[in-house]
Amino acid sequence: MSEWDLKICCMGAGYVGGPTMAVIAAKCPKIRVCVVDLSQKQIDAWNSSDLPIYEPGLPEVVEQCRGKNLFFSTDIDAEIKAADIIFISVNTPTKTMGIGAGRAANIKNCELCARKIAEVAESDKIIVEKSTVPVRTAEAVRRVLECNDKGLKFQVLSNPEFLAEGTAIPDLMKPDRVLIGGVQDEPGLAAAEKLVSVYANWVPRDQIITTNLWSSELSKLVANAFLAQRVSSINSISALCEATGADISEISRAVGKDDRIGKRFLNSSIGFGGSCFQKDILNLVYLCETYGLKECAEYWNQVIVMNDYQKKRFSEKMVSSMFNTVTGKKIAILGYAFKKDTGDVRETPSMFVVRDLVLEQARVHVYDPQVKREDMWTEMEYTVQMSEATHPGLDAAVTTAPDAYTACANAHAFAVLTEWDEFKELDFERIYKSMAKPAFVFDGRNLLDHAKLREIGFEVHAIGKPDPNKFSDL
Ligand SMILES: NC(=O)C1=CN([C@@H]2O[C@H](COP(=O)(O)OP(=O)(O)OC[C@H]3O[C@@H](n4cnc5c(N)ncnc54)[C@H](O)[C@@H]3O)[C@@H](O)[C@H]2O)C=CC1
Ligand SMILES: O=C(O)[C@H]1O[C@H](OP(=O)(O)OP(=O)(O)OC[C@H]2O[C@@H](n3ccc(=O)[nH]c3=O)[C@H](O)[C@@H]2O)[C@H](O)[C@@H](O)[C@@H]1O
């Protein structure tokens, strides 16, 4: 008899696989959980005190379970063989070439996992799609698995993840809902029930939703599209506020008070970033196109168009405010991560602003409490195709500063691009004294006290906030 009630293997030890499995292990001491990955470096980091991702509360959960019922390994074959349930939690990025390039999600990694499972498994298993995938991917996974020549039976479930980075641990500990999709026949329903019973260790049953496979896969794309759509909607209004004297924060408050609309996700910003919003909307757009739904595709694509506009609008405002030139000027960028409480820079809006400023030949000094310089360059090369090789002098044009004060010293402007709490506590008198005059502030997150900054002497520009010099009737 095994000492474990159940054995879970998760393929993919990234932002989702790591935290999700750590919380399952913490909540289910009688389940053995092992997270496997192709990358030895990633697994070594999970097995060290310096975890590969920054996520508040994560080190404590990992510390509590690692070596007891939570393991990280590169021995993929052995862990597949041992597992009753296998989660596939690998990256599904937007395709960069071939059919659907720039829109379709690449599910190559999911297929490779299915092929690996079919190759090495020696017993029947439940396979759980945790990755975000185009609707009907489970069909491809099932067909690959069925090609095993050992007569093994696999049940494929969809169980998309809704955690947000920076709040992954509370999101996993107390999810709004857990979604499980499965084939609606006896073995499919039994497999779904088995997964329900894992989550039921800490999630109330009425918050565990079961659906058919396709609804589950598609709900994930729709949830992200709706969230991103709110950000683009409020950002579109921020431009109108700047033109008319209305204030975007007052609009968000007034509109969000309506229960039917709700107050969350109405913070105007320089645009949304992160590894998923853009990828998942593009995926949705591509799906609509594939099924001949041109109007639906155009509707959702507009969310991306508005986001690109907002990022561009911000850097153009910086340049035009500073007398139409930033050439040779030092500009401090406070915050590079795509949101606070993460070191993740995938699709971060800060990158687009930095790119635009560098192309205008500014000297950019970036400070972020969690972002590593090497990650900044990797993402810049991947997403905007800029590197020292393509843009000689790039490395020298962007300095990473050890703190906000160093970044701002002698700068003509500073821009807040990530809403880190520590930026609210900065000594702005000190910063003002150290800067070139006029000293400009561009608040891309509406994080700071603008009236106070103006009192100190700064010229302040913020998203969706009327310029007091332009409107005398505020
Ligand atoms: N990052 C997030 O906050 C969220 C992501 N998702 C979705 O979850 C999925 C994973 O996302 P992340 O964890 O952010 O990706 P990630 O890039 O952080 O991690 C993916 C990991 O999978 C590994 N991998 C790739 N192919 C593999 C294979 N064949 N066998 C074993 N390991 C393999 C990679 O080495 C990498 O470590 C994506 O589909 C994403 O859309 C869903 C909700 C939230
Ligand atoms: O599938 C995913 O990857 C995840 O995507 C998002 O999570 P995440 O991208 O980690 O972070 P969010 O808090 O959603 O923020 C995304 C972007 O929108 C921006 N945002 C968010 C809210 C807002 O009001 N305004 C705004 O500009 C953030 O600054 C950030 O750049 C979703 O919130 C998660 O539910 C989902 O699981």
Image (cartoon, rainbow, N blue to C red):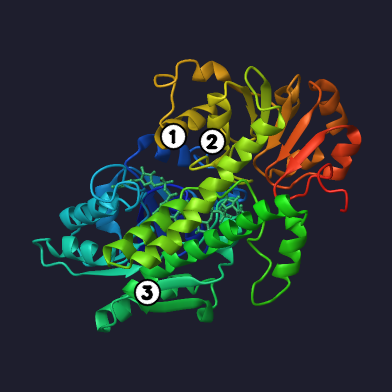
Amino acid type, mark 1: Val
Where disc 3 sits, the SS reads helix
Amino acid type, mark 2: Met
Image x and y of residue 410, in percent:
76, 19
Kindly indicate the quadrant of the structure image that contains residue 432. top right
Q: Nearer the viewer, mark 2 or mark 3?
A: 2
Say which residue label 2 marks. 351
Q: Farthest residue toward the right?
A: 455
Closer to the camera in the image, 60 or 106? 106
Q: Is mark 3 within 8 Å of ligand 2?
A: no
Task: State how far apart marks 3 and 1 are (Cα).
Answer: 34 Å
Say which residue label 1 marks. 384
Kindly indicate the quadrant of the structure image that contains residue 194. bottom left
- Marks 2 and 3, the one that precedes in the sequence: 3
Q: Residue at x 86, y 23 (%)?
A: 433
> Are the residues flagged by discs 1 and 2 in contact, CB closer than 8 Å?
yes
Closer to the camera in the image, 52 or 336? 336
Image x and y of residue 92, in percent:
35, 51
